[in-house]
Amino acid sequence: MGRTQRNQTDAMLRIIAALDSPLRLRIIELLADEEHPVHELVAKLGQSQPLVSQHLRVLKMAGLIKGHRTGRKVTYALVDHEILEIIGSLKKLTCRISGE
């Protein structure tokens, strides 16, 4: 396996690992329609700010979201909406496999 292929595989595994959390999937769903500052995500998710920030960090490290700072406020958005198509495909596959 060449370096490029190994790097691509590593990046894919980071994305898959980032999707391995119901809370992170919910964050992606919330960011599907519009960007949100951290405090809005905390309120909508009903989770603590440190926990939400930890999950945002995982999604950012996987390259799925980006944040921009305005003063003290950090607002997050999806990098590419294609992740929504991937999640949709996974939902369809899960239904087919489970027979639902």
Image (tube, helix red, strand yellow):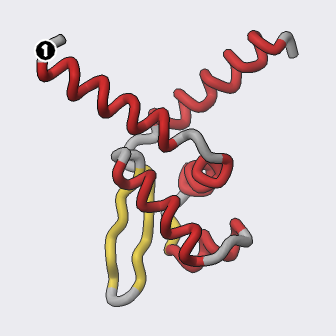
Image coords of residue 42 (percent x, y): 63, 73
Q: Residue lying at the far left in this picture: please name it.
A: 3
On the question of residue 33 being in view, the answer is no
| The C terminus: image quadrant | top right
Image coords of residue 13 (percent x, y): 40, 31
Which residue sits at x=67%, y=47%?
Answer: 22
As helix, strand or loop, the secondary structure at mark 1 comes to loop
On the question of residue 68 being in view, the answer is yes
Count residues near mark 1 (Cα–Cα under 10 Å), then give few for <14, some for 14-19, many for 20+. few
**As displayed, is residue 78 above or below residue 6?**
below
Which residue sits at x=21%, y=28%?
Answer: 7
Please give left or right for residue 60 compared with residue 1 in the image.
Answer: right
Q: Residue lying at the far bottom in this picture: please name it.
A: 71
Which residue sits at x=39%, y=42%?
Answer: 80
Q: Residue lying at the far front in this picture: please name it.
A: 1
Mark 1: amino acid: Gly
**As displayed, is residue 47 above or below residue 84?**
below
**As displayed, is residue 67 above or below residue 20?**
below
Image coords of residue 43 (percent x, y): 68, 76
Which residue sits at x=49%, y=65%?
Answer: 54
Number of marks in the image? Answer: 1
Image coords of residue 18 (percent x, y): 49, 43
Residue under label 1: 2
Quadrant housing residue 57: bottom left
| The N terminus: image quadrant | top left
Please give left or right for residue 28 compared with residue 62 in the image.
Answer: right
Task: Identify which residue, 35 or 74, lies in the foreground.
Answer: 74
Task: Identify which residue, 54 or 38, lies in the foreground.
Answer: 54
